[in-house]
Amino acid sequence: MDDMFENKNSADAGNSEPGFSEKAKEDEPVSFDARQQNSADTAEPVMSVDAQADGTSQQEQPNTDVQPNFSGIYNDGFNTPPCTINYTPITAVKDYKPVSRGLKYFAAVLAEVILLTAASAGGYFLGRSSVRSVSGGNAKIELAAKPAKTDEKTAAEVYEDVKASVVGIMVYNTAGQGSQASGVFYSSDGYIVTNDHIYAEVPSAKFKIYTSDNKEYDAQYVAGDQVSDLAVLKIEGSGFKAAQFGDSAQLNFGESVVAIGRPSDATDDSSITKGIISSVGRRVRTTSNYSAKLIQTDSAINPGSSGGALVNMYSQVVGITSSKLAGTEYDAVGYAIPTRTVKRIVSELISKGKVVSRARLGITYTAINSVTAEINGYSSVGLYVASVSEDSDLHGKVAEGDVITRINNIEVTSDDIVLDIIEECSAGDTISVTVLTKGGAEKTFDAVLKANTGESSYSTKAPSSSNSESGNSSSSGGTFDFPFGE
């Protein structure tokens, strides 16, 4: 802190005494301030004075014949007896201002120093803060409707429109572990959306971002979410080309799309593959406990393309690509996270540092369809309750072995029905649950949905150099074994 208040005039400071200028200009205040006196830095500030309004010299001697009036104050306006000391009378300043210009200047400089000090200290502690250090922003997107009565663009035209919005991501740590992935500019001020799994195997990951104009940026981790497999990074700057996000709900089976990402090298130009929409909402398992509805496409989505853009032929990003389905028995099966999900999750990751509105019922279950019911002798289809968490609103109401037959009075013929209903709800919403108990009684309960905040794959644990060899061999950023979980 001392360095910030270094005496800039120390070289000129001496033993000279502070004094007034020889003659003040008429009607112009003379201001003295410690920061304005090169010859006397230690002098106390002197209030502003003016020359006399009538233009007479301030060096004139006082009238020695002044007599006191009835109040005991001499006619010159002072309590001092005449001729006791030599002094120069000072007339009242007619345009007096409470604060001199020099004092204002001093206050402004001091305020600037304080602000600079606070900013420096804030930046220091911000840099040392947790991995959610840059959350709390307000970046939001609106999903654009598909243009009406407009011809589709060619793949080349779409690529030219979107390439500046897609970036390469190098994930690494000090132990030499790393991976590569892709990302999409979510906003023009540097927020980038990508996949959460890209750093799952790289503890204390750091990030380099490579843009289409061959520039490199350091990025900070903002937040991530395992359940949706979405994450947000942030680079400093402005004027980046944010993608135009289209409404994934307007996709059609067989609609042409392209996937744009950097599958081979994060520093290379983005590549493009073309395909169609194979399914507009196939539910697949994203973790061992959760599933999500994803866009299925036959566009090639290879390792390194995770976090890239799935784009319709109007240059609208309709999904964030995730890893290709693992397994040699599958061909041309890739998935993307719909923009409807992206908008909801990413806005909360940026503003809150976690997902706060996503809902959960708080049970584990086994789905009973008509075939399962016939084989095992169940009297009804639905969800066989395996357990109820203690924080669930159904705890103490529904027991293991009960079968959930209806949600909001909709018959449960598959678990997709229940999951779809809950995904459309928010934490705090109330739904009705009808169960068939083990004793054969049918009961209906109201249940308040709890928040499913989830966790991120990002880890702050110290990296281990013993794993660096395996880490260097990975360029995919991790792979999800869809639809079978991790």
Image (cartoon, rainbow, N blue to C red):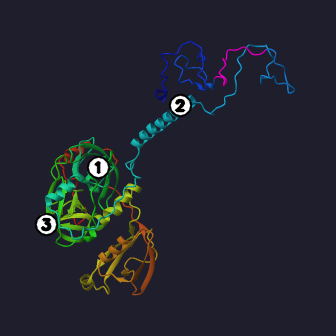
Q: CA distance from mark 1 to mark 2?
A: 39 Å
Q: Nearer the viewer, residue 285 or 62?
A: 62
Which SS type dominates the magenta stretch? loop
Q: Earlier in the sequence, mark 3 or mark 2?
A: 2
Q: Earlier in the sequence, mark 1 or mark 2?
A: 2
x and y percent of residue 202 in the render?
27, 48
Q: Which residue is mark 3?
A: 330
Dot 1 amino acid type: Phe
What SS does tag 2 mark?
helix
Q: Where is 156 relative to 49, above or below?
A: below
Q: Which residues are magenta?
A: 51-63
**Residue 55 on the magenta segment:** yes
Residue 252 shows up from this direction: yes
The part of the image, by quadrant, that contains residue 342 is bottom left
Which numbered marker is on residue 105? Answer: 2
CA distance for labels 3 and 2: 73 Å
Is residue 408 shown in magenta?
Answer: no
**Circle nearer the viewer, 3 or 1:** 1
Callout 1 secondary element: loop
Image quadrant assignment for residue 121:
top left
Q: Position of residue 40 (x, y in %)?
A: 56, 17
**Residue indicated by mark 1:** 240
